[in-house]
Every structure is written in structure tokens, then in C-alpha cells.
Image (spheres, rainbow, N blue to C red):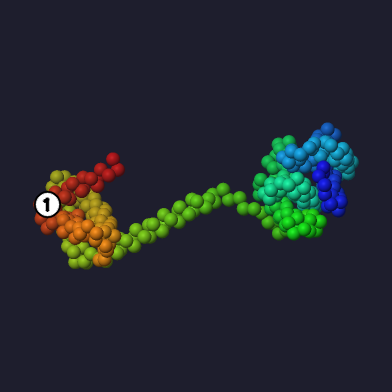
Amino acid sequence: MSVEMDPLIESLYYWSDIIGVLLMGMIGGTIARQRGYDIVGFFFIAMFSSLGGGMIRDVLINRGTVAAMSQPEYLYLAFTGAIIARFVYFKGKTWDYVQSHGDAVVSALWASTGALKAIAYGLPFIPCIMMGVFTATGGSMIRDIAMGREPAVFGDNTPTVIPAVACALVVLGADATGFLAYGVILGPIVSFVLTMLGIWVGWRIPARQEWAPVNDTAAYVMVMARKAENKGRAVGRRLEPTKLRAWRHNQMEKALQRRIEREVRAGKRRADATIDASEFLDSFNEEVAEMSAEMAAASSDAHSDFGVDLSGDSYDAQNSEGPSPRELLDRILADEKLTDELVEKLMHRYENRDN
């Protein structure tokens, strides 16, 4: 780095960086071997794997030449890793072990160096964490994209971003408390342990496509609203005398029975007429119950037994109110002819409700 730094910290940074480059060059070269690439493919995949994250970090920091270009040892180590992978192969369980543990080590080291370089250039808190994450995962993302694969950090795989964030946080915390050298050592250890936990215990980040907290909350609110609505209807029914409800029901049944007889005389099957009348009566009772509940709620909201009367008209609204819809309905049901007319109109509306 071109900024002044404690020699111990600079040494830890340098060795962490170049160890990661060599290891990731070997891993990238082995992946190129598995895909059947020639020596050119070995070098390119190794270079993307081992230098991509650092290049992203240095381009984003934008302070001087990218380290991979200004310090040739980075390229040498990346190509050395590719050559090693060209002449020494890993496969089966050995390769699974080398790749998983090698990736864990490299990600841990690079998360630390990325955050450390961001701190050295005075970046704010969040960008320092981002530099740690990009350095740790950027190379593997570029490699996967170049090989036509979905980057492993996006899918249902062993977490790499969360351990990188944890490492960066440790480094930042150590820098804030004046123990940066300890943080550069402890941070990678924390990241490596978290990554190994993901491997050993099968830890994965959930990826439920249907999970949507806003939708879930809205659905829960709708359920609660329905419960409140049903409770309001129940209160309305309790407030209304049972005998009055029974009288209304009886009056409607009589009117419907008269209608059934008229329809039968007109040629309609009695069973069909009875079914239509029964369905209509159920719908009518529900509407009346809703009306009763709404009126009870409105009455409780509109009329208060106590208040401040500045204009002297607190009784005007009460004295000027006409009959309520429920009272009008009772007056109609008390007259047989009016009830028959009401049933005819309501039945016509009910039968044409879907049209």
C-alpha cells in the first residue's frame, strides 16, 4: 500500500494477500482442469480467481494503480498456482476438502486485507465492510461468470459473505480500540470458523421465494379485520332483541312461501323455487346482521353521554333524526303487501347479482 502503516500491520497485510493469491490460483487452475481447458484457460481462470477480488477493491478505492498491475509478484503467484494445478491434480474427496478449506482460508484472509486497505485510505464504516466482502468474494464471482455459471455466493451454498462481514467488523473494531494487529489476526480466524460451521453443520442462508414479510403482514391484518368484523356482527346481534329477529325471520319466511306458491302456479318446480328462496333468505339474514352491527358501531361512535357543547346544538342531531333503516325495514315487514313487494325487488337483485 502507498499509505503509511505500522510495519507489523503492513507485513500481515502483505503475507495474507499473497498467500491468498497463490491458493486461489491453484483452486482456479484445478477448476479449469475439471472443465477441460487448455493452458490458456488455466492462466485466465487462475488470474480471475486470484486477482479479481483485489482488482475490484482497488478500482473502487481509486487510489493509485491496481496492486495486481503495480506489483508483479501478484501475477507471478497467480500463474504459479495455475501451473501447480496443471501438473498436480486434485479430485474426489481430496479435491472437496482442498477446495472447501482453501476457499475458507482465502476468503478469511482477503476479507481482512480488504477491510484493512479501506481503513488505510480512510473510507467510512460501511464501505470498509464492502471492501472486505468484495475482496473475499469478487474473484470467485468473476471466475464463475467467465465459466458461464451462476456465482456460488448467490445461491443455496455455504455462506461466504456473512463470514467476510464478520471478519471486517472484527478488524474495524480492533482499529477503533487501538489493537489493529490483533484484529488482522483474529478477524480471519472468526471468518474461517464461521465458514467451517457452514460446511460441517450444513448451514445455509434461507432462500424462500414465497417469503415476503409485507405480504404476510397484510394477510395477517386481513385475518384480524375479519375477526373484528365478525365480532362486531355478533355484538350487533346481541344488542338486538331475539324476539324481534325471530319476528323478522318469520315475516320473510311467510312472504317467501307466498312467492314460492306463485312461482309453482306459474310452472316452476317447487324444489327449485324452494332452494332459491332458502338461499335468498340466508343472504338476507346476513345483510340484516351486517346492518345491525354497523348501526350499533355508528351509534356508539356518534353519540356520547359526555362532551363539550360550545354551540348549544348537541341535542339537535338526536332530535332531528328520522327512522333508522332497521326501523323502516320493520315497518315494511309489518305490512304483507309491502313485504311481498320488497321480496320481489330483493329477489330480482339477488338473482342478477353476478350479471
Residue 85: x and y, percent?
Answer: 86, 42
Residue 68 in the figure: left or right of residue 322: right
Residue 174: x and y, percent?
Answer: 75, 57
| Residue nearest the observer in this picture, 352 or 13 | 13
Residue 121: x and y, percent?
Answer: 75, 45
Q: Is residue 189 visible?
A: no
- Residue at (78%, 37%) from the top-left corner? 64
Q: Would you name the residue on which mark 1 appears?
A: 338
Residue 346: x and y, percent?
Answer: 20, 48
- Residue at (19%, 66%) from the top-left corner? 243
Q: Which secondary structure, mark 1?
A: helix
| Residue nearest the observer in this picture, 272 or 47 | 47
- Tag 1: amino acid: Leu
Q: Quadrant of the C terminus?
A: top left
- Residue at (53%, 50%) from the top-left corner? 212
Q: Is residue 322 above or below residue 89?
A: below
| Residue nearest the observer in this picture, 224 or 8 | 8
Residue 9 in the figure: left or right of residue 282: right
Q: Residue furthest front?
A: 310
Residue 171 in the figure: left or right of residue 348: right
Q: Quadrant of the N terminus?
A: top right
- Where residue 325 sits, quadrant-wise, is bottom left
Q: Is residue 235 visible?
A: yes
